[in-house]
């Protein structure tokens, strides 16, 4: 691998001295560098262990040591002689200080999950989740099979108006406008049988476009009192921790962002992995905090000037390097290192 020490030094703003056999005969130079107290960057990950042990055995070694691979990730290829800018960039990046710990956001969920979808599929999903979570179903029609005769889960229905939030803090708003109150309905099916227009399905909601105000359903439901055509539409808002959405991606309202919020899942009715992920969302969770940035927030050479540390570059000596047979583009390597580099990243260019 050709190392252009002068060009690298120019890019990094230091005079670099080339050495050979740094991990062997010239190890003393490395030991000298790690006593300076300044950060030393070793451009070889293959000999990381050797250099680490060497530093440990060196009396007075106080320098932090970083390692970077400029061979496989930089100059090892057919166009190695043009890789100097990339090597310089790798070295410059290696001497940047460690980044600050990423701030995190905490989510708390008690496992209140809302399943939105046709009632048959929603109840199927609910059966899988119910032992671990508190399930509520937002019915979107009966589906092929309709709801089961036993009402095992709270079911709400109506015109979905808004869906917003994130894990532990979803807010769902809808208009409960149907004459059948699902809290009161016992699923006795009397109204389904009584309706001459077949306007009531197994989601226990009246299809008002088919209803001709016959009102036979009201009569048969007298005991439960679940049907009331004079009831005003009631705006409802509830909070949930997790949302499992069985509607199509184009359904509205929904989330349109490329990255869906934490705690919101779409389910095709088949994929068990999704349900397993939902089941796990009870408790407290942390995730990195993401910030919206614009291009102008990207660090520039000018803003990074003060962040660099001295660099020690080292390429593999001959015995460590692959042979020409293994890589036709291979150039005979040279051991090289340089220390005491001052930061001048502006020279690196884009
Ligand atoms: S008659 Fe009343 S209780 Fe029975 S299914 Fe119809 S709405 Fe529900």
Image (spheres, rainbow, N blue to C red):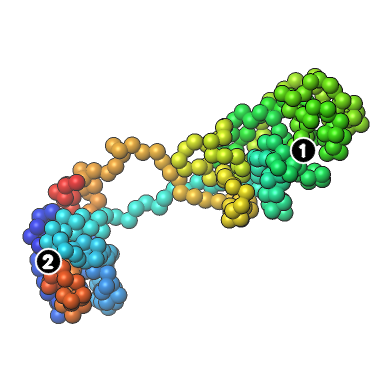
Q: Is residue 319 above or below residue 136?
A: below
Furthest toward the right, the residue is 223
Q: Mark 1 points at which residue?
A: 202
Give the x, y percent position of residue 217.
85, 28
Give the x, y percent position of residue 234.
72, 24
Q: In this view, does 45 lie above or below 228?
A: below
Of mark 1 and mark 2, the one earlier in the sequence is: 2
Residue at image coords 79%, 20%: 212
Quarter holding the N terminus is bottom left
Q: Left of 189 or right of it: where is 255?
A: left
Camera-side residue: 37 or 78?
Answer: 78
Residue 323: name its quadrant. bottom left
Q: Mark 2 points at which residue?
A: 2
Camera-side residue: 107 or 186?
Answer: 186
Residue 9: name its quadrant. bottom left
Disc marking residue 261: none
| Residue 7 visible in this rendered orientation of the protein | yes
Q: Left of 242 or right of it: where is 327?
A: left
Give the x, y percent position of residue 322.
20, 75
Residue at image coords 57%, 32%: 253
Mark 2, residues whose alpha carbon is within 10 Å: few (<14), some, or many (≥20)? some
Mark 1, residues whose alpha carbon is within 10 Å: few (<14), some, or many (≥20)? many
| Residue 341 visible in this rendered orientation of the protein | no
Q: Left of 314 or right of it: where is 243?
A: right
> Mark 2 falls on what kind of element?
loop
Mark 1 and mark 2: span between their CA atoms?
Answer: 76 Å
- Observer-side mark, 1 or 2, equals 1
């Amino acid at each position: 691998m050709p190392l252009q020490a002068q060009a690298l030094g120019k890019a990094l703003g230091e005079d670099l001295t080339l050495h050979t056999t740094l991990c062997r005969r010239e190890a003393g130079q490395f030991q000298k560098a790690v006593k300076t107290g300044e950060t030393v960057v070793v451009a070889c990950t293959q000999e990381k262990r050797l250099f680490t042990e060497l530093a440990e055995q060196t009396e007075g070694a106080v320098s932090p040591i970083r390692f970077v691979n400029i061979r496989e990730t930089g100059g090892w290829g057919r166009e190695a002689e043009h890789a100097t800018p990339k090597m310089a960039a790798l070295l410059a990046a290696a001497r940047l200080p460690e980044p600050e710990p990423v701030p995190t956001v905490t989510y708390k969920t008690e496992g209140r999950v809302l399943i939105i979808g046709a009632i048959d599929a929603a109840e199927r999903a609910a059966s899988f989740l119910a032992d671990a979570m508190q399930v509520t179903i937002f019915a979107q029609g009966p589906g092929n099979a309709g709801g089961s005769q036993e009402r095992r889960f709270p079911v709400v229905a109506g015109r979905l108006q808004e869906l917003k939030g994130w894990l532990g803090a979803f807010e769902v708003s809808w208009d409960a406008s149907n004459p059948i109150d699902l809290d009161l309905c016992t699923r006795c099916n009397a109204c389904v049988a009584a309706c001459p227009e077949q306007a009531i399905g197994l989601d226990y909601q009246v299809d008002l476009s088919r209803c001709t105000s016959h009102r036979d359903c009201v009569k048969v439901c007298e005991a439960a009192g679940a049907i009331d055509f004079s009831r005003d539409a009631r705006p409802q808002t509830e909070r949930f921790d997790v949302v499992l959405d069985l509607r199509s991606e184009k359904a509205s309202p929904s989330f349109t962002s490329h990255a869906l919020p934490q705690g919101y899942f779409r389910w095709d009715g088949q994929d068990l992995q999704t349900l397993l992920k939902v089941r796990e969302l009870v408790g407290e969770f942390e995730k990195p905090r993401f910030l919206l940035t614009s291009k102008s927030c990207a660090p520039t050479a000018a803003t990074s000037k003060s962040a660099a540390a001295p660099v020690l570059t080292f390429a593999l000596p001959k015995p460590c390097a692959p042979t020409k047979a293994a890589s036709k583009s291979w150039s005979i390597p040279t051991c090289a290192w340089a220390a005491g580099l001052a930061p001048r990243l502006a020279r690196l260019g884009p």
